[in-house]
Image (tube, coloured by chain):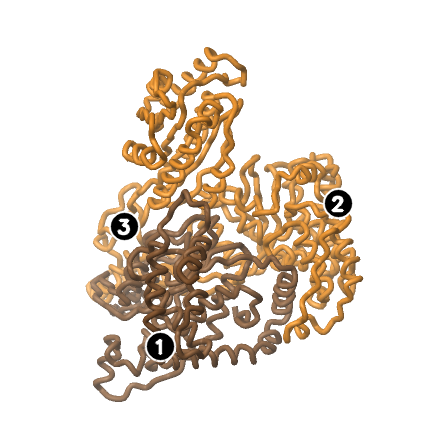
Chain colours: A orange, B brown
Amino acid sequence: MTGAAVWSDAVTAARLFAADPSGTGGVLLRSRAGPVRDRWLAMLRTALPPSSNVKHLPLNIADGRLLGGLDLNATLLAGRPVAERGLLAEADGGVLILAMAERLSAATTAHVTAAMDAGETIVERDGLSLRMPARFGVIALDEGADDEFASASLRDRLALHLDLNAIGVRDAEEFALDVGEIAAARARLPSLKADAAQIEALCTAATALGITSLRAPLLALRIACAGAALAGHSRIEQEDLALAARLVLAPRALVFPPADEAAQPEQPPPSTEDEADVSGGEDQTPDIDRALDEVILAAARAAIPPDVLAALRTGSVGRSRPRSSGKAGALQKSSKRGRPAGVLRGELRAGAKLNLIETLRAAAPWQPLRRREATGVGEGSRPRILVRKDDFRISRFRQRTETVTIFLVDASGSAALHRLAEAKGAVELLLADCYIRRDQVALISFRGSVAELLLPPTRSLARAKRGLAGLPGGGGTPLAAGLDAAFVLADSVRRKGQTPTVIVLTDGRANIARDGGQGRLRAEDDARSAARQLRGAGVDVVLVDTSPRPGISGEAIAKEMGARYLPLPHADAATLSKAVLASVG
Amino acid sequence: MATAFPFSAIVGQDEMKLALLIAAVDPKVGGVLAFGDRGSGKSTAVRALASLLPKMKVVAACRYNCDPDRPAEFCEDCRVRATKGGLKSAQVPVPVVDLPLGATEDRVVGALDLERALARGEKAFEPGLLARAHRGFLYIDEANLLEDHLVDLLLDVAASGENVVEREGLSIRHPARFVLVGTGNPEEGELRPQLLDRFGMSVEVKTPDNLADRIEVVRRRDAFESDGEAFVAKWAKDEAKLRKKIVGAREKLSSVSVPDVTLELAAKLCMALGTDGLRGELTLMRAARALAALEGAKTVTDDHLRRIAPSALRHRLRRNPLDDAGSSVRVDRALSEVLG
């Protein structure tokens, strides 16, 4: 698609979303920050009703601000607990914009998605127990680079997925949105309903495209309704369904549907007793269904970019599990600030975190007494609540920094022959242990001429196992590239406030240089300099020599890294994992 | 939300629905964990449970949902009030209490009532979510994302059936027995093994892969969203039927017999799978009995055992990362070995 075509879809998406923000869930806007994105957001703003709230959710929002809690000022003034609404409740009836959605913590994402599902927020905090309406549409700004994505649970709930990265400012010409038309569509929306055949057609198309989640056809339905409302249709037309297929289903497609429509929809089984009621008694003739399916599929097919199409044809995407879900947690990161470890009576020194609620609780029982003592002392200016120094309570957190264990596995020919299977086994055993300690693991392999991140830091054993299962062996030993990759990952782990540990499984015999060139000498040189880089960063490294005859090369590299060296000539997976554990502690 | 999607209108998901019904019949089976695909209706099913369950009898105005028929388990307040004569009882809906992820500890276990403390200088206890969930269900969506310190609290209370509060000069204990229900997606992270262990049953939830079912799910969901009340009304009869079934099963439960041979089979099955402790056998037996009661059977049969074994045992297997087969497959294997 050309940039202009993408932009025109983006404009359509803005209109559809504006017509039904909470019904469509929202828009995933994958785009770098820049004029194109700004223009789209500005356009959206004009399309929304002037009264609607537009709230921005910053990346590192505190739970209290997001969900609501006790309002400090108001509580002190009133002398009784006063609740403060959180951002989710404030966005009710409007739009919530998520900044850097690809980096949103799992917990924050869960709060947002829970509110989206229930249309309300449930607050159980600071002595308050509240339910507040929270119906809003979400704009998730995803600035992710190649492998970074907003979490799958969020994407699943947003009808429209846009990618504006490919288009230039010149393509993004300003469209004059007809605000009146959108308002009229909003009013028309409740009267629009899909009939049974249309629902069936959307489901069939979604299945043919390999989409597992049932939210996709449901959201496509919402978009079809919004599309019909915008077009001024009195009922949902084929073109509305086609629009929904193009904008909602196509971006989620995992399988390219065969053009000759070999996979015919199965005939629905004899209807159960209630089915007829629910469908509204509409008769469905299979012929019409088929035609409708074909229209929808054709629309979706046309919207799937040709390069993706080629990849699908070569079969890189199996029909097994949706790959996208695997990438979901790529950015899952812990935003733990240590677990609360109780409160302490104490002074407010720098860095101490006042626990307001506990402070007030400590002060509360003394109020009548203090008030009596304080009579006569400037009646008018006296605060409603008399808090004394003794009452101050400080939150204590037990900082438990998470460890991310990065496995760097040599999958080159020399290693593959001997030890790859063992290494895999050992990694899995270690994974199981990391899992018990709630640490995270990541996996990088190197072979041929490059290193590859097979598994971004995760706690999910299921995902890790999948990553390992597909680990192929063979080719050269680009040790330098592997160590570099480990260094980069360790660095990013550290920036998230976690502690990286690198476990290298290799025979240490580098033969591919950093630039991919052959030649043992240069390769070893590069490996040594990569190793020094790791040592310079002060990363904990364990080198497991997987060579059948552990020798000088492994030990030398370990020394350069300041790593613990574990020669394991005849280890099976279990011994290996035990040895590594013992040495990591 | 005012109206919940009717339980009986949920398409497919038979294993999850059965597990929830079993927990409703016999809370002693110890809770349900539903892990699986996004958008497959896990939370919908749990929320649907609240309006499905028959009402329960409580001491009127008791903050801990005390059962008037069990004076031995009364809370402090009820004990005092009982001595002064006649406690009134009331019928209330069975609580299905949400434990939201961002909850703070004071709201979970209960704490000094800030309102009364500030306004009147009184030291009074304000019960938390655990008190509210007593004799009902405590529901954690995205259970794998729950913060560790809250998990610790839950483990403690779930084990003892009692909530002990010692804070801010308060010293209070009250009964807190609830069915723990958790949902989540394994892609977001694993559940802590200790918590996993607390669940009596664990079910794997998958999006239906059969087209007709998928269409039916979307159709019903759409009908519900466009007119919730009409939809609920349409399903009221089925809901009532199911409710009656639960009530009937609860009454029958104690009279369902478990033959020795069946018990032996259950033990053999657990041994074959190498489950830790005896909790596996116990849950297996209880769940099979509740299933039999639901179906109006007088005795637990091998078939009941077979059908319930995957839910009762799959999360109790020792982890063997080298075995690529999922837990369900391993349970199936053991089943065919033991039961033939």
Question: Which chain's residue wears label 2?
Answer: A
Question: Which chain's residue wears label 1?
Answer: B
Task: Tell me, yes or no, if residue B46 can be seen here.
Answer: yes
Q: Earlier in the sequence, mark 2 or mark 3?
A: 2
Q: Is residue A397 above or below residue B79?
A: above
Q: Both on one chain, marks 2 and 3?
A: yes
Q: Is residue B229 above or below residue B273?
A: below
x, y percent for residue B294: 45, 76
Contact? badges 2 and 1 (CB < 8 Å): no
Nearest the viewer among A105 and A273 is A273
* The C terminus of chain B - image quarter: bottom left
Residue projecting furthest to the bottom: B86
Q: Dot 3 surroundings within 10 Å: few (below 14), some, or many (20 or more)?
A: few
Nearest the viewer among A126 and A560 is A560
Q: Dot 1 surroundings within 10 Å: few (below 14), some, or many (20 or more)?
A: some
* Amino acid carrying mark 1 in the image: Ser
* Amino acid carrying mark 3 in the image: Ala
- The residue that appears at 48% across and 61% down in the rendered structure is A121
Whole-number angstrom distance, CA of label 2 to CA of label 3: 56 Å
Residue indicated by mark 2:
A302
Residue projecting furthest to the top: A521
x, y percent for residue B194: 32, 54
Q: Which mark is residue B257?
A: 1
Residue indicated by mark 3:
A341
